[in-house]
């Protein structure tokens, strides 16, 4: 992947990114969908939490598209008569919080370690890379299962475990980028000018690595969300009365033959969100690459 020596800071940068986003209709739809998901994650619990928790045994496993009962019943109800649409909206916050927390912490720790591993001395780099090898020697899902079984399932423990398993992704990527960038002229010029290693790493090298890390983080968000859903499906993720999309799928699996909608709708929410994140990640990879972004810019000019 090609690199840029500085982060774009010209006034027209956001306008250019907007034009490139408009040039990619799939990425545009994905961004709109993810914006809606983020808004629902912020306001969902305060808006529909009471309705999502209210039981109505007379309406248990009600089928979807019964519009006469109200829009919150459009997707049907679960085994306790609670509206699925309201529960999916409320569950958005926990699902997004776990994924975002794990990605942010793993990116911060992995990027910092990667900067030191790539720019510091050989011995320091070897020690840090052996740490990454130890983490990667355990299958991430198996490690999460073991730790959560010992510590107990909770949102905090889930974030910590998933963050730890994703640290090597950012560490190895950052180190590989730094090993190439540190030989560039602007880094050597900063060394001649007497800049400290810390300043060179965080002021000069990090901005060049950020576009690549942002692309990886967007794709990694989808992976972490799927991992959280898998753990909740296995029963060692977030526990009731808290809800996530993965937990809703787990709760509905015993009714798959009689009430398929209990697992189908939260599963569809996961599929659409991960698909949107994948599309946005692909768009970012092109938009932030000076060698390839001309394709989106040309398409944007034609549409304009």
Image (cartoon, helix red, strand yellow):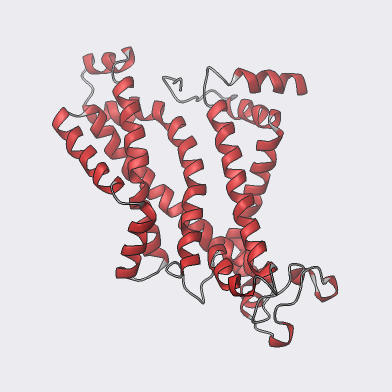
Residue 296 makes an appearance in the image: yes
The percent position of residue 34, horizontal first and vertical second, equals: 62, 48
The single residue placed furthest to the left in the displayed view is 123
The percent position of residue 90, horizontal first and vertical second, equals: 60, 67
Q: Is residue 221 above or below residue 70?
A: above
Residue at x 64% of width, y 50% of height = 272
* 154 left or right, relative to 50: left
* 211 left or right, relative to 79: left
Q: Quadrant of residue 259?
A: bottom right
Residue at x 36% of width, y 30% of height = 206
Residue 304 makes an appearance in the image: no
Q: Which quadrant holds the C terminus? A: top right
The single residue placed furthest to the front in the displayed view is 257
The percent position of residue 119, horizontal first and vertical second, equals: 24, 27
The percent position of residue 11, horizontal first and vertical second, equals: 57, 25
Q: Is residue 116 above or below residue 250?
A: above
Residue nearer the viewer, 294 or 168: 168
Q: Quadrant of residue 47?
A: bottom right
């Amino acid at each position: 992947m090609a690199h840029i020596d500085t982060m774009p800071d010209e006034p027209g940068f956001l306008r250019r990114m907007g034009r490139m986003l408009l040039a990619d209709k799939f990425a545009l739809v994905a961004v709109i969908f993810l914006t809606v998901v983020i808004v629902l994650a912020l306001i969902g619990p305060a808006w529909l939490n009471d309705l999502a928790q209210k039981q109505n045994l007379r309406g248990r496993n009600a089928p979807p598209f019964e519009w006469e009962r109200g829009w919150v019943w459009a997707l049907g109800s679960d085994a306790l008569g609670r509206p699925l649409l309201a529960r999916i909206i409320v569950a958005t916050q926990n699902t997004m919080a776990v994924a975002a927390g794990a990605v942010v912490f793993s990116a911060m720790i992995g990027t910092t370690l990667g900067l030191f591993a790539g720019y510091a001395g050989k011995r320091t780099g070897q020690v840090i890379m052996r740490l990454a090898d130890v983490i990667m020697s355990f299958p991430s899902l198996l490690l999460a299962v073991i730790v959560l079984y010992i510590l107990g399932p909770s949102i905090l423990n889930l974030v910590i475990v998933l963050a730890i398993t994703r640290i090597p992704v950012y560490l190895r990527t950052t180190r590989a980028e730094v090993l190439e960038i540190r030989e560039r002229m602007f880094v050597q010029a900063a060394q001649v000018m007497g800049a400290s290693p810390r300043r060179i790493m965080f002021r000069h090298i990090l901005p060049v690595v950020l576009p690549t890390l942002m692309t990886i983080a967007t794709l990694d968000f989808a992976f972490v969300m799927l991992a959280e859903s898998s753990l909740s499906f296995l029963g060692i993720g977030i526990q009731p009365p808290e809800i996530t999309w993965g937990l809703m799928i787990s709760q509905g699996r015993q009714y798959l033959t009689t009430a398929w909608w209990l697992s189908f709708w939260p599963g569809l929410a996961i599929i659409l969100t991960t698909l949107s994140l994948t599309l946005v990640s692909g768009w970012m990879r092109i938009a932030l690459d000076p060698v390839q972004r001309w394709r989106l810019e040309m398409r944007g000019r034609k549409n304009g």
